[in-house]
Amino acid sequence: MKTYCLVILTFFSIITSCKPTAEEVVVYNSVDQVFSEPVLKDFERETGVKVKAVYDTEETKSTGVMNRLIAEKDNAQCDVFWSGDPLRNNILISRGITAPYQSEETALIPAYFKDKENQWIGFSARARVLIYNKRLIQKDDLPKSLLDLIKPAYKGKFTIANPLFGTTTFQIASLFAILGDSRAREWMQDIKANGVIIATSNGDVKKRVMQGEIAFGLTDTDDAFEAEKESDDVAYIFLDQQNSGMGTLIMPNALSLIKNSPNSENGKKLIDYLLSKETEAKLAVSSAQMPLIRGTPLPTNVPSLDAIKPMKIDYNETSKVLEEIQPWLKQWAEQ
Amino acid sequence: MGRAINKYVIHNLLTLVLLLLLLVPVLMVLVQWLLNAGKINAISFLDRGALLLIVNSLLLSATVALLATLIGTACGFFLYKTHLKGRRLYLLLLIVPILISPYIFAVAWKDLLFLLFGSTASAFSTAGVIAVHTLIYFPLALLITGNALTNISSSLEEAGLMVTSFRKMIFKIVLPLIRPAFMSSFLLILVFSLGDFSVPAFFGIKTFTVEIFTQFSAFYNYDAAITKSLLLVGVCLILLLSEARYLSGAAFFSISTRGSNSKIYEMSGIGYVHHTSFAILIILSMLMPVFILLYQSLSGREIVIDSAWKLLKPAVFQSIKLAFWGALLISIIGLYAGYWQERLKSPFTNVLLLILFILPSTILGIAFIRFYNQPETGFIYSSLFIVLLGYIGKYGFIASRITGNGIRQIPVSLEEAAEVSGVRPVNKFIKILLPLLSPSLFVSFVLTFVLCLGELGTTIMVYPPGTELMPVKIFTISANAPQALTSSMALISLLITFFFIILFFMAGRVMFKKNSDE
């Protein structure tokens, strides 16, 4: 009998090990765990508020957290959604899952990097870049613009991640927003005809270029930064930086407070903490993310946003464009 | 009358609990879908393209299932029916691919192709998917058909050999006798291959499961995803139920003392051919992927195995603890479902577990979230119990079949003799059935422990915030971590699983040797 009791007690000990504590915040996170976890640990240490995180990653399509947030809509469990770009936050806004939030800290962020109603607030940005293998192609021979990818000289030499997922979706949607529907579709068909290789993710793009499997590809600054750390053969450039160029896509991290969340006050505390120079400085060091708050110290190997010509897009409009073009993108990817 | 009803309810209590905890959430999603079906015009999701895709996916998975079953059966024959030297070591090494996540296996093979030939184009094809799936799943066939081979009574083979040649005896006696196991293996691998999206997605091959995943993850379109999942579940159910007699009759991982009666053949002078074949198979399915993981682990700018261990450490112990409880619960449920199926001829619990087994992980996760994320059931949703429920849903059927087939091999006469002697049903179960079933229960526990330790599909959808589990951590860390760190983590996970297999293998030898001595 004693044994049975012991078994039952032990079994229930694993259940009760997850009981909520008074001071906690639940954050669902689609930013790479290697970069976001240390920041959340710092918050926990500095404020005493326990952070309960669910990690996922845009590399792996954010399926876990996004589907959770949607399925939990009527009984929210999450307080803050930390996304690697605002597109996913906009999907949640369209489904009525987020709540607006404004504070002194949110005011530090330039209006361009925030939702008009503060349903998402941006911070620390990444950019889309061209990563290349120096053994396979010289810097001078690289394309200067995304539009150059259709040139015969680059036939079969470049890769992009599946445009249905992650930040590649964002880049393609922004291109549609800038070029217009018909020109962008034509460009997509042309790069296909020019032998673009579709990788599974930005990480896969990075790996293929690093290994020397392919000359160059499009990815995010954090991937390029990691690749440079891992291999001397890899470097990256920003595209479309000419005076007449359309600029490069800047993608801020985006925070949203979840509507009717269980620990909304702690959620607000966490948002304020993340929207600080200190956090932006940490992310600049760990993953080459470019701060949005002026005066944030930068490591020498991380470019300042002021030094890059940005692509001028409206993030919310681009999200709408994405929803319109997604079925076509699926067809394109499956062709 | 009232007493009879009470007895019926008590006997079916666990079935009712399972129905409530596992099937009702799924049925609720189905009901919501049906209520919505008119509005969303569900049929529009099942166009000609979708039907064509499911046919193509079935063909791909059937090819995998056939190849894996043929390879597994051939291996099973030499490892279980001959005195081939080193067969225990071969067996241990050949089951390693089951422990490697299909995605990691695919990445390792692609990297290896590049390392060897400087090109990976050949991997990005249907053939690449077939090759990887075959190498991952043939050990299942090896275990299933191997155990069936050990259960063939030697008298049948000896009688055959007296009147005909060895070759004819194999084709006329042995193969027909293991046909249920062959079919069981074929269908199980077909379902596994059909359900995996990670390998075809990585190799850029569109399958029906990739399509369901895309609807979930790119479009967040539940209606389309659920409609297509239902079609997939329907097809799997038709396949599995049409072959139910084979599935229920197959030996399916069972361990039986009857195995000692099996005929073992002496190897003729061409043993080196078999050793070479096994060496090639082990190189392809185990050594190559492990080598590439090791190579990548050590090829970074610094050795990161220590960092990988530090990252994984908190998740490892939690995962082992959870896998232990998961395997224990699943084995108990498997015993219950198997007993009802085999002795009481009531297949309901088994069918319930079968439906959950073939359900895509994402659907199971969504169903659990929708059902358990309520104020009344929040205590389950916010605890690790939700992960355990996911484990039971995913692997309860496997445990049920392992134990069920173990029960089939115990002569009913033993229980009848006990009944005639006036032994109480509880004592009959505890004193007769359980000791005889212990090998099957042990296999059920070990296999489900290993599967729970690596489960990702449902776990990532439902694990409570703040919890660290090994497969989830490897999955999320690997996105942007250096290759050396990712490979080190995969390698550590593999070593931990392999350590437990060896531990269980040794424990099994001690336990069952002791039993047989007694």
Image (spheres, coloured by chain):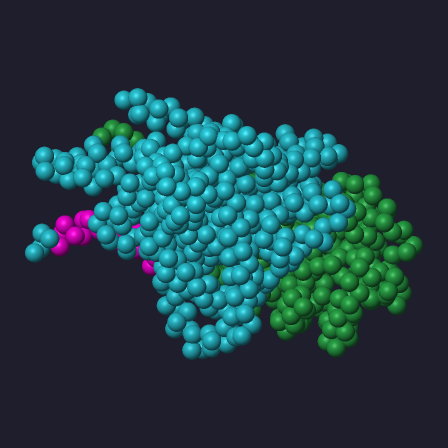
Q: Chain A is which colour? A: green
Asked whether residue A43 appears in the rendered view, the answer is no
| Placement of the N terminus of chain B among the 4 image quadrants | bottom left
Determine the residue positioned at 63% across, 73% down: A324
**Given the current orientation, which residue lies at the most extreme front position?**
B163
Q: Quadrant of the C terminus of chain B?
A: top left
Which shade of the palette goes to chain B?
cyan
Closest to the observer, A9 or B452: B452
Which range of residues does the magenta coloring cover? B5-24
Left or right placement of residue B287 versus residue B33 in this view: right
Asked if residue B510 is positioned above or below residue B472 in the image, the reply reads above
> Is B9 within the magenta?
yes
Q: Position of residue B38 (x, y in %)?
A: 42, 78
Q: Position of residue B495 (x, y in %)?
A: 55, 32
* Location of residue A269 in the rendering, given as x and y in whole percent from the top left corner: 56, 49
Q: Position of residue B131 (x, y in %)?
A: 60, 50
Residue at (75, 34) in percent of width and height: B301
Q: Magenta part mainly helix, strand or loop?
A: helix
Work out whether residue A136 or residue B509 is closer to the camera in this orientation and state it.
B509
Tell me, yes or no, if residue B227 can be seen here. yes
Observer-nearest residue: A126 or B210? B210
Is residue A237 placed above or below B105 in the rendered structure? below
- The residue located at (75%, 49%) in the rendering is B119
Answer above or below: position of B139 versus B203.
Answer: above
The residue positioned 60% from the left and 56% from the top of the image is B200
* The quarter of the displayed image where residue B404 is located: top left
Residue most toward the left?
B1
Callout count: 0
Asked if residue B99 is among those painted magenta in the image, a careful observer would answer no
